[in-house]
């Protein structure tokens, strides 16, 4: 079922109207959605229970301070008996599905509302553009110059349509200045649209062409990125050169939505070397760089979660040294996922490949 939500004020207001009705008509107890605060124009993941506060929601803003799946998983850690609507980007939904598989949360209380995503800007750039123009959450979809400002990971993302949702907010083929499309992807989603009285209409004729063109564009850009990165990391010397400025701050690990371990080996005594060991290494080699184990840190993360990387790019966004962490995660992760014919977040019932044993018939 496909409908178009109209608003003279644009797609953002149409989405707010939908979310407000979910609350006022008691279909949900709260909505988890990106919203601006009194303190900043940067929309942050926010849990809203009051219909009046939905006016702060800004889910179409071309920015995501971090991958919100981690915060969503906190809300869904157990079934509280409360019904929650979660408005998330495709990479956030895919990460959330992986966290469900890892027993970090449950989806029973959730109504998933996905957003077709044309990319996000880095936080500082978004705030800069927000000051220069009003209504960036609408103008972004109309201004090709703004679309070119998206982060590098989004520029190569070919999973810009959400999967596994109840409702999908559609930005392809519609004029965001006058409304937004919404498509029911489940019985729950269909029931919601019918209860609200929305009619079933044909999607815009230009929608498929727009989707196809962007898919081709993103795949070509991804191919270029992976070819370059594969050359940059083809041997250990080149890889160590790429990550040479790593501060061992662990920002990338903290920002990663699928790096889920409660206790990370890199914050245990395993790598808390005694001074005698460090001095012996320095004597043996003539010199050692500190902090140590930065190469091991990145290689371990690649081996641990390469299969589950959703290519959200937040690892690069938070790196203070400007290391293109997402580039080598996207490159290696794609190879690993192809090897196992596995796409993170594609299907909640699809087993994690590392946890499956298949005996081959000889």
Image (cartoon, rainbow, N blue to C red):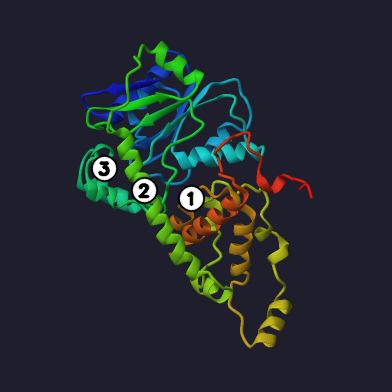
Q: Which numbered circle lies on residue 216?
A: 2
Tell us which disc is closer to us: 2 or 1. 2
Seen from the viewer's position, the closer of residues 285 and 278 is 285
Q: Is any part of residue 125 visible from this angle? A: yes
| Image height of 257 relative to 178, above or below | below
Mark 2 lies on a secondary structure that is helix
Q: Is any part of residue 120 visible from this angle? A: no
First in sequence, mark 2 or 3: give its number: 3
In three-dimensional space, the C-alpha distance between marks 2 and 3, rounded to whole angstroms, equals: 21 Å
Task: Say if mark 3 contacts mark 1, CB within 8 Å.
Answer: no
The residue positioned 44% from the left and 66% from the top of the image is 228
In three-dimensional space, the C-alpha distance between marks 2 and 1, rounded to whole angstroms, equals: 17 Å
Q: Which x, y percent locates residue 303?
A: 63, 58
Q: Which x, y percent locates residue 266?
A: 65, 60
CA neighbours of label 2 inside 10 A, class few (<14), some (14 to 19), many (20+)? few
The residue positioned 31% from the left and 53% from the top of the image is 125
Q: Which x, y percent locates residue 158?
A: 42, 46
């Amino acid at each position: 079922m496909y409908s178009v939500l109209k608003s003279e004020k644009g797609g953002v207001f149409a989405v707010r109207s939908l979310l407000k009705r979910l609350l006022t008509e008691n279909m949900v107890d709260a909505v988890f959605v990106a919203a601006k605060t009194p303190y900043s124009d940067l929309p942050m993941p926010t849990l809203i229970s009051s219909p009046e506060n939905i006016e702060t929601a800004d889910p179409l803003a071309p920015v995501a301070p971090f991958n919100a799946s981690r915060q969503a998983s906190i809300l869904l850690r157990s079934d509280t008996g409360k019904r929650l609507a979660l408005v998330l980007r495709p990479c956030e939904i895919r990460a959330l599905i992986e966290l469900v598989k890892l027993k970090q949360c449950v989806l029973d209380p959730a109504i998933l509302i996905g957003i077709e995503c044309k990319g996000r800007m880095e936080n500082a750039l978004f705030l800069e553009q927000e000051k220069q123009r009003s209504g960036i959450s609408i103008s972004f979809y109309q201004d090709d110059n703004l679309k070119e400002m998206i982060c590098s990971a989004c520029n190569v993302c070919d999973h810009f349509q959400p999967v596994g949702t109840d409702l999908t907010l559609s930005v392809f083929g519609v004029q965001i200045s006058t409304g937004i499309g919404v498509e029911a992807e489940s019985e729950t989603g269909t029931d919601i649209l019918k209860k609200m009285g929305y009619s079933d209409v044909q999607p815009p004729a230009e929608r498929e062409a727009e989707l196809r063109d962007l898919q081709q564009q993103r795949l070509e850009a991804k191919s270029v990125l992976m070819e370059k990165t594969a050359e940059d990391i083809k041997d250990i010397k080149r890889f160590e050169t790429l990550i040479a400025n790593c501060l061992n701050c662990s920002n990338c690990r903290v920002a990663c939505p699928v790096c889920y371990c409660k206790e990370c080996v890199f914050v245990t005594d395993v790598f808390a070397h005694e001074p005698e060991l460090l001095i012996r290494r320095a004597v043996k080699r003539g010199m050692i760089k500190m902090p140590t184990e930065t190469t091991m840190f990145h290689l371990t993360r690649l081996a641990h979660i390469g299969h589950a990387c959703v290519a959200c790019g937040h690892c690069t966004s938070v790196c203070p040294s400007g290391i293109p962490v997402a580039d080598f995660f996207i490159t290696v992760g794609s190879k690993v996922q192809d090897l196992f014919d596995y796409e993170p977040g594609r299907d909640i019932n699809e087993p994690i490949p590392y946890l499956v044993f298949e005996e081959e018939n000889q």
